[in-house]
Amino acid sequence: MQRRLLQHAARCSHLALNSLVVDDGLADEYHNLGILYSVQGKLVEAEQMYQRALQGYEKAWGLEHTSTLDTINNLGLLYKKQGKLVEAEQMYQRALQGYEKAIGPDNITTYVPSLKTILNLGLLFERQADLAKARTMFSEALHGYEQVFGPDHAKSENLRDYLYDLDVGVENEASIQIEERADHLQVGSSHFGIKKPPSISKRHSCFCDGLNPIFGCTTT
C-alpha cells in the first residue's frame, strides 16, 4: 500500500513539475505532496511542491487567503528544517501578517492555523536563543489555546508547562552563570545544589517531539 502511494506521489510530482497551469484543485495536491515529501525528508522536492501550491493559491484565491497562508507557514517549517532560519522567520511573519488581514488582528489567537504560526515563531526564536521574543510568542499562543480549547485542555496544559520550564531554565542558567563567575573569582561560593537545566536546543527538541501531534510543529 505504501509503495503504491509513493508511486502515485511520484507520478503526481512529475505532472506537477511539468504542468504549465496551476489551478486551485491542483494546488491542494501540490500542498499535500509537499507535506508528504517533507515527512520523508525529501526537502528539495517538498519545497518545489509548496512553491507550486503557493502559485496556484495566489492565482485562484489571492495573497491573503487562508490556504495561501497555510502553505506559507509550511514553507517556514521547511526552511527551519533546512537550517534557513532567516527565511523561516520571513515566512512565519508573512503568514502571521496575512492571517491578521484575512481574519482580523483580534481573531488570530482564536484561529488554530494562526496559533500554530505564532507557536512556530516562538520555537524559532528559542532556537535562535532570543528567549524574550520566544516567551512573548509562547504566551500569546497559550492565551489563544486557552480561549479555543479551555485552560484545562491537554494542549493548553502542555504549552503552559513548557512555558514554565522555559522560565525556570532561564532563571537557573542565570544563577549558574553568576556562580561560575564567582567561582572564577575564587570568592568561595558553591553551587548550592542547583541542577543545570536542559539546553535550549534540548528543550526545543523535547517540545517538538512531545507536542507534535497536538500543535503540528513539523507537518502542518
Image (cartoon, grey):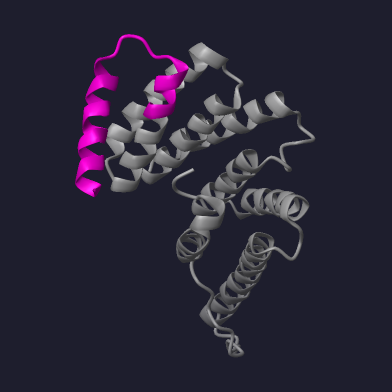
Q: Answer with the quarter of the image where residue 108 lies.
A: top right
Left or right: 10 with respect to 102? left
Residue at position x 63%, y 26% in the image: 98
Q: Which x, y percent locates residue 60?
A: 51, 13
Residue at position x 30%, y 39% in the image: 43
Q: Nearer the viewer, residue 10 or 177?
A: 10
Left or right: 122 with respect to 103? left
> Which residue is outermost to the top?
20
Left or right: 38 with respect to 206? left
Residue at position x 38%, y 45% in the image: 81
Q: Looking at the picture, does residue 55 appear above or below residue 82?
A: above
| Residue 24 magenta | yes
Q: Looking at the picture, does residue 131 appear above or below residue 90?
A: below
| Residue 118 magenta | no
Q: Which x, y percent locates residue 182?
A: 59, 79
Please tell me how many numbered marks the rendered image carries. Answer: 0
Specify the segment rendered in magenta: 1-30
Q: Which x, y percent locates residue 3?
A: 19, 45
Q: Main secondary structure of the magenta part?
A: helix
Q: Which x, y percent locates residue 153?
A: 70, 63
Q: Nearer the viewer, residue 94 or 8?
A: 8
